[in-house]
Image (cartoon, grey):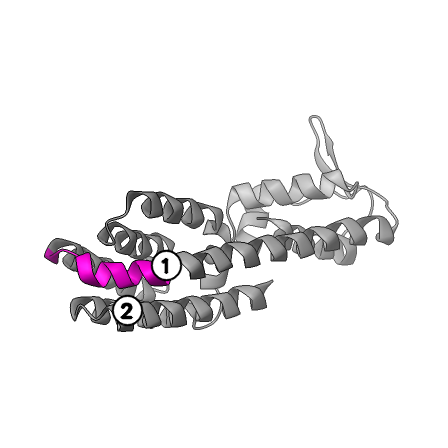
Amino acid sequence: MYTQVAQQLQDRIVNKLKPGDMLPPERELVHRFRVSRSSIRDAIRSLEAVGLLEPRQGVGTVVRALAPEAVITPVTNALLQERKVINELLDVRMIIEPPLAWRAALHASTDQIAEMEAILNRQEEKLHRDEPAIEEDSAFHYTIARAADNGVMLKLVGVLMDLLRETRERSLQAGGRQRKSLAGHRTILAALKRQDAAAAEAAMRRHLLEIERIVLQKL
């Protein structure tokens, strides 16, 4: 999922660069857009595909002259398609994860509850250091899926985490998102500790709705 980065790169090219200019080095783009190298590479490939950029052997990536409408339509269509796919993935999370939280409240072992507590403590430490906590975010949801004691659902959650990883990384950069994420996780964990299945399911549903709102705003 890289089309938002592609759109930002396109905006920079249109506003700052002219045909024949070199695209800045990959390392500079990673720092500027605060995304992974793979996201930058995918964004560059998408803009090469629509003809805005041209890779030149031994030189680098060069900006090409191109009519604006030739670029805007493909990239806009890609953004709309990305939003549709992410909406569908978020819908799947909403279908799967609240019932898993219900089951986890009834099946979680003492060790699994302790593991979740440790994960949230690490998440809070990263929050205080203003560091992204994507690993802890994923681990918390995955541990709930393990506690629900359903191997098929566990695999589905793992796939969803992978498919939504970059989208979740972006959303965690939104102002206040990490604090809201931690608060939602704490509420879910409190219900799991009480073995209150209905409260755990409701807390997970509220948490996912908050995530969905922020993710779609970022798009």
Q: Earlier in the sequence, mark 2 or mark 1?
A: 1
Q: Residue 173: horizontal and vertical position, in percent?
A: 47, 63
Residue occupying the point 18% across, 55% down? 115
Q: Which mark is residue 97?
A: 1
Residue occupying the point 46% across, 50% down? 165
User: What kind of element bears circle 2?
Assistant: helix
* Apparent side of residue 52 relative to residue 161 in the rendered image (left or right): right
Q: Residue 55: horizontal and vertical position, in percent?
A: 72, 33
Q: Quadrant of the C terminus?
A: bottom right
| Picture layout, residue 39 above or below residue 179 | above
- Depth check: give the residue in front, 106 or 144: 106
The range drawn in magenta is 97-110
Q: Kindly identify the amino acid type of the residue bearing the numbered disc 1.
A: Glu
User: What kind of element bears circle 1?
Assistant: helix
Q: Which residue is mark 2?
A: 200
Q: Which residue reaches farthest left?
A: 110
What secondary structure is the magenta-colored segment mainly?
helix
Distance between the alpha carbons at the discs numbered 2 and 1: 10 Å
Q: Residue 61: horizontal and vertical position, in percent?
A: 70, 37
- 105 part of magenta stretch: yes
